[in-house]
Image: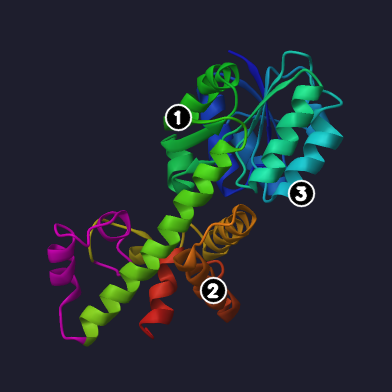
Amino acid sequence: MARVAFIGLGNMGGGMAANLAAAGHDVRAFDLSQDALDKARAAGCTPVESASAAVEGAVAVITMLPAGRHVEAVYEESVFPVAGPDTLLIDCSTIDVATAKRVAASATDKGLVAVDAPVSGGIAAAAAGTLTFMVGGTAQGFARAEEFLAVMGKTVIHAGQNGAGQAAKICNNMLLGATMVATCEAFALAQKLGLDPQTFYDISSVSSGQSWSMTSYAPLPGVGPKSPADNGYQGGFATALMLKDLNLAVEAADQAGAKTPMGVRAAELYRQFADEGHAGMDFSAIIKMLANL
């Protein structure tokens, strides 16, 4: 087993690091939160006092950080100065494509191999080791990263060169955000037209309106498989995180000259929902705003 540095032990990173430790890896973990470090220790990781200390002697460095500016700062200040010549760099954060490419180029200039490997699946999947990883990087980088990513996920897909993983994540979550809004609108309209939500689910889930937001993540309690709606919209994927991803998609579309009117509108609606005080609720809770629940 290998020594792995894990930097960023939030809701997602904590579960991911725990799975690496459970698989027998020597995980040197760092986070600014003492509570996160205590949880990492309980899960079999070795907490350290700094990001640089985590990187020392590591075969692979995995980062799970809030935004591109954090990723770039950690790599420039704590990873690049300490990483050995054969250290593999894996960034699992969801950030903008330009920063992902820039960090990878800096790694290449220093003779290091870096991949971007954002995730899909949420907190429960991170804890269960069933995440999906979409990986951007060279074939060599992907082959090396797959060994570690497979421990934390059920699906690991090579999306293309550096930045392609972030592109895939941004596009996927723009689709998810827009689809969830449409699903919530449909449930709200069905109710106002006198249609029972379960009956509507039974019809739509096997008809042309079927989507993951409908059949796996229905936004009303007691309808479909268990989802955050059955837990007061707690857990799952926070509205603030969906808004972050939608903003990244809108920014990327502007830079690429792509037209994404549904993505733009979804971002506007999630921004309104977050501004009304619901940033911490699961993103499916936007049905409360759309249906006036």
Q: Which kind of residue does numbered mark 1 sit on? A: Val
Residue 190 shown left or right of residue 212 in the figure:
left
- If you read the primary sequence from the N terminus, does the residue marked by circle 2 or circle 1 appear first? 1
Residue 195 in magenta? Answer: yes
- Are discs 2 and 1 less than 8 Å apart at CB? no
Q: Which kind of residue does numbered mark 3 sit on? A: Arg
Percent of width and height locating residue 268: 54, 73
What secondary structure do most residues of the magenta stretch adopt?
Answer: loop
Residue drawn at (57%, 42%) of the image? 166
Q: Mark 2 points at which residue?
A: 268
Residue drawn at (40%, 78%) of the image? 288
Percent of width and height locating residue 60: 66, 22
Q: Which kind of residue does numbered mark 2 sit on? A: Glu
Q: Distance between the residues labelled 2 and 1?
A: 32 Å
Q: Nearer the viewer, mark 2 or mark 3?
A: 2
Residue 153 higher or lower than 13, as above or below:
above
**Can residue 50 be seen at all in this image of the molecule?**
no
Boundaries of the magenta span: 193-222
Q: Mark 3 points at which residue?
A: 69
* Mark identifier at residue 246: none
Question: Secondary structure under badge 1?
Answer: strand
* Mark identifier at residue 156: 1
Question: Secondary structure under badge 2?
Answer: helix
The quadrant the C terminus occupies is: bottom left
Q: Which of 93 and 179 is in front in this view?
A: 179
| Quarter of the view holding residue 156 | top left
- Mark 2 crowdedness (10 Å alpha carbons): few <14, some 14-19, many ≥20: some
- If you read the primary sequence from the N terminus, does the residue marked by circle 2 or circle 3 appear first? 3
Q: Nearer the viewer, residue 121 or 19?
A: 121
